[in-house]
Image: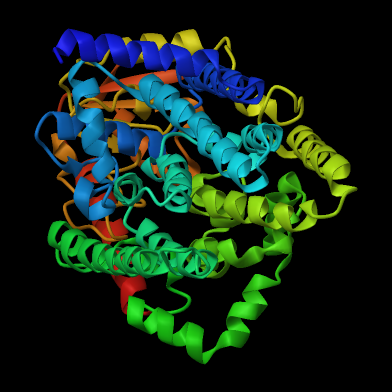
Amino acid sequence: MSTTSRLRDGRERLLQRLATMHAAAWLTLIGIFVFATVFGSLGVQNHRNFGTWSYDMGIYDQGLWLLSRGSNFMSVRGLNFWGHHVNLIGVAFVPFYWLGAGPSFLYVAQACVLGLGAAPVYLIARDRFRNEWMGACFAFVFLMYAPLQWISWAMFHPEALVITPFLFAWWFATRERWGWYFAMVLLALSTREDVALAVFMLGIVLLVTMRSAPDFRRIRKMCVGTMALGVVWYLLATKVVIPFFNDGQEPFYITYFYGNYGSTTPEILANIIRHPNRVISDAVQHDRLTFYKQMSWPVGWVYLGNPLALLMAAPQLLASVIGLSPYARMIRYQYTSVMIAPLFIASIQGAYVFWRFKVAKVLLPMWLVGCAYVSNIAWSPSPLNEKDSVVWSNPNVRHESLRRALAVVPEDASVAATYQLLPHLSHRHRVYDWPNPFSAAVWGNDDCAHLPDPRTVEYVVLDKTQIGANNQAVYDAMRVTGGPFEPVFEDDNAVVLKRVGSSPAVDVQPQQDSCQQLALRHATR
């Protein structure tokens, strides 16, 4: 058969399949399109109106731009791209960065991938209930899920892309299509190194869930292979790749987020095992209970009917519960990404337990839709929630001033900028989150390694509302008569300073003092 004939036959099969698609499937596709359109456009609006920040949009935008130029060191973060996280999926964005992609593109791409997760949710629920409308019901709940919609707001993060391939992996496993299953598992692993822990648990949960399948011996091999893949990838990423690109050190977040439990991974694990009372105490704090509630009410708590699949979310949930960062247990940020797919799988499995009751065939869809809708209005950043939808930055009279300030800076100049201006300047090799590098602040591994000489900074671009009281002395020293910088743009909102000289009060003493403070803090831990 010729290539033309094969293409024609493939097109005819596709058209036939589309023509025979169930109405519930069409509604799911429409929902995916609406989600991607709404949240993609809101993301673009957010960036254009200075609603993005150095951490993390500036980090990933510069990191991906650097990859497309054959470089790795992210001056925004003070870390090598591969020493920060192992985000292999970043390589897929390189061709788009050759064509000029940036934060707006990242927002749109992320919204599309997040919305696409409704497709495997539909398929998993349709197959489990043998009912297309229950598939559409769960797809609706997924698209209305408040934590998912918050991820679409919280800048761009590669780990946000894990949700869709993880869900597809589960569906392919239940269909015993192992080639596609492992393709989705590998895609999920490419988003971030700690996804490997969820993949390890995926193997365990599938092993238990599919134990009654006729071909269980083959399934068991696939599950063991999944667990082995998770372990090998986690060890390779955290013990080889990250240390190799991070001056031999463990991932920065080990002590950054979990220093209250230890300074190394084995020490943290040992303390968790030896002191379960500490974990329980952390787990029942008010902010954790609020977190559980806001993750669970949008799915109506139906996962309680069969919570086994929640094991796949357990490693990330534990990390969020015991960690020092309060943001890790708030639905507003990307830390929920690895938990969402397991939670929906568990919810579908749990809801099916109730499906055996005749009354549930009427009440269950109503309960799910009602919980999704009410919680969306209460907790999401969607346009339905008038209170929280204001998080998407809107046009402001100050913005034209900020744009004029940005226009003054040459494209290849070395720049230090405040956090809402930096994402508009991140396509360059040397751009620093103010007050770096003049004073070390959330740099590298919370140290001064690779912190450059401040004299290499040619321009300082500041939103006057974000200079910060702690940095006022450095800023004032820049502006003194005969000082190292002179303004090339200034109004009530922003200032752009250009280097014309050097002085110890700007280029030596602040960095020296901050590095001494960091060294002292590390010495007293």
Q: Nearer the viewer, residue 509 or 433?
A: 433
Q: Using the image, determine if residue 284 lies above or below residue 296.
A: below
Q: Is residue 244 left or right of residue 233?
A: left
Residue 464: x percent and y percent? 47, 26
Residue 288 in which image quadrant:
bottom right
Residue 144: x percent and y percent? 67, 33
Q: Quadrant of the C terminus?
A: bottom left
Residue 373: x percent and y percent? 78, 33
Q: Using the image, determine if residue 266 lies above or below residue 49.
A: below
Q: Nearer the viewer, residue 237 or 57?
A: 237
Seen from this angle, which residue lies furthest bottom? 274
Q: Residue at x 58, y 52 (%)?
A: 345
Q: Is residue 202 left or right of residue 427?
A: right
Q: Residue at x 59, y 18 (%)?
A: 30
Q: Is residue 418 left or right of residue 323?
A: left
Count the marks: how many?
Answer: 0
Q: Residue at x 29, y 47 (%)?
A: 179
Residue 311: x percent and y percent? 54, 67
Q: Is residue 491 visible?
A: no
Q: Is residue 8 left or right of residue 340?
A: left
Seen from this angle, which residue lies furthest right? 359
Q: Using the image, determine if residue 324 lies above or below residue 279.
A: above
Seen from this angle, which residue lies furthest left? 70
What colour scheme was applied to this rendering of the protein? rainbow
Q: Is residue 62 visible?
A: yes
Q: Quadrant of the N terminus?
A: top left
Residue 24 in which image quadrant:
top right
